[in-house]
Image: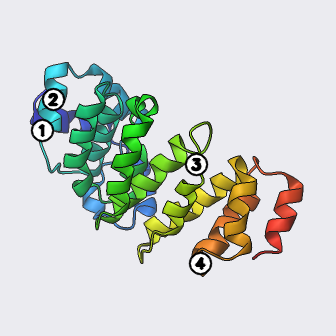
Amino acid sequence: MDTKTLQDRLLREAEPEYRRFSVSLLPTLDPQSILGVRAPRLRKIAKEMTPTEQTKFLDTLPHTCYEENNLHAYLLSELRDFERCLEEIARFLPFVDNWATCDSLRPKCFGKNREQLSLAIDRWLSDAHPYSVRFGIEMLMVHFLEEAFDPVYLQRVAAVSSEEYYVNMMIAWYFATALAKQYETAIPYLENRRLAPWIHRKAIQKAVESYRISGEHKQYLITLR
């Protein structure tokens, strides 16, 4: 599947109504870069690509549209070689320009390489590119809030200082999830107001909306607004 064949396929799969919906969710993107292809169809295309086609596509950066970036994220998420996955992510992250593509990047091989992943996360958190930072926080949320949890991870996220909306939203999401999974360790960050005011309020909002947090804890969180 060469570039033109892929682009023709994406155009055939595009839906005008879904495109309008996607444009409304992605204000940071040029609307012309969004075709309107649903995620299941992109995942199907990814599965149909041969290994050679996948490698050729991953080597082609930057891409021309939002859907190609998401396809790239889905392909990276399926890589089994951890070192190669890290290398490919390092190449790809500078081109990630929206929250949805960033959040589509969920490499399965990360779960078996947490010690090395932690070192990579430190690099992402200190990166100047906002979506590298968002990705790093998300990986801490996905992989280090249960059996691999260490209180130092809360400190790492709380120390992130950014003016970027999509970074701050991810910090709030992280702490709301931490309240669901590591309540006793996370709650002092809200009690002592260690987060920026907007993040503090948003974390509480998301926690109160969560079905994973008890009613008793929600009532207490409301008093911390």
Give x and y (percent) for residue 219: 87, 65
Compared across the picture, whether 163 is left or right of 145 comes to left
Which residue was labeled with disc 4?
Answer: 198
Residue at position x 29%, y 38% in the image: 71
Mark 4: few/some/many CA within 10 Å (<14, 14-19, 20+): few
Depicted 133 relative to depicted 105: above or below: below
Cα separation between marks 4 and 2: 42 Å
Q: Residue 183 is drawn in which quadrant? A: bottom right
Between marks 1 and 3 in the image, the one whose residue lies nearer the viewer: 3
Cα separation between marks 4 and 3: 25 Å
Numbered badge on residue 59: 1
Q: Earlier in the sequence, mark 1 or mark 3?
A: 1
- Mark 1 near mark 3, Cβ–Cβ under 8 Å? no
Q: Earlier in the sequence, mark 4 or mark 3?
A: 3
At label 4, the amino acid type is Trp
Compared across the picture, whether 55 is left or right of 25 comes to left
Residue nearest the observer in this picture, 110 or 211? 110
Which residue was labeled with disc 2?
Answer: 55
At label 3, the amino acid type is Asp
Mark 1: few/some/many CA within 10 Å (<14, 14-19, 20+): few
- Mark 4 near mark 3, Cβ–Cβ under 8 Å? no
Q: Earlier in the sequence, mark 1 or mark 4?
A: 1
Q: How many marks?
A: 4
Numbered badge on residue 31: none
Cα separation between marks 1 and 4: 39 Å
Secondary structure category for the residue under label 3: loop
Q: Residue 53 is drawn in which quadrant? A: top left
Secondary structure category for the residue under label 2: helix
Which residue was labeled with disc 3?
Answer: 150
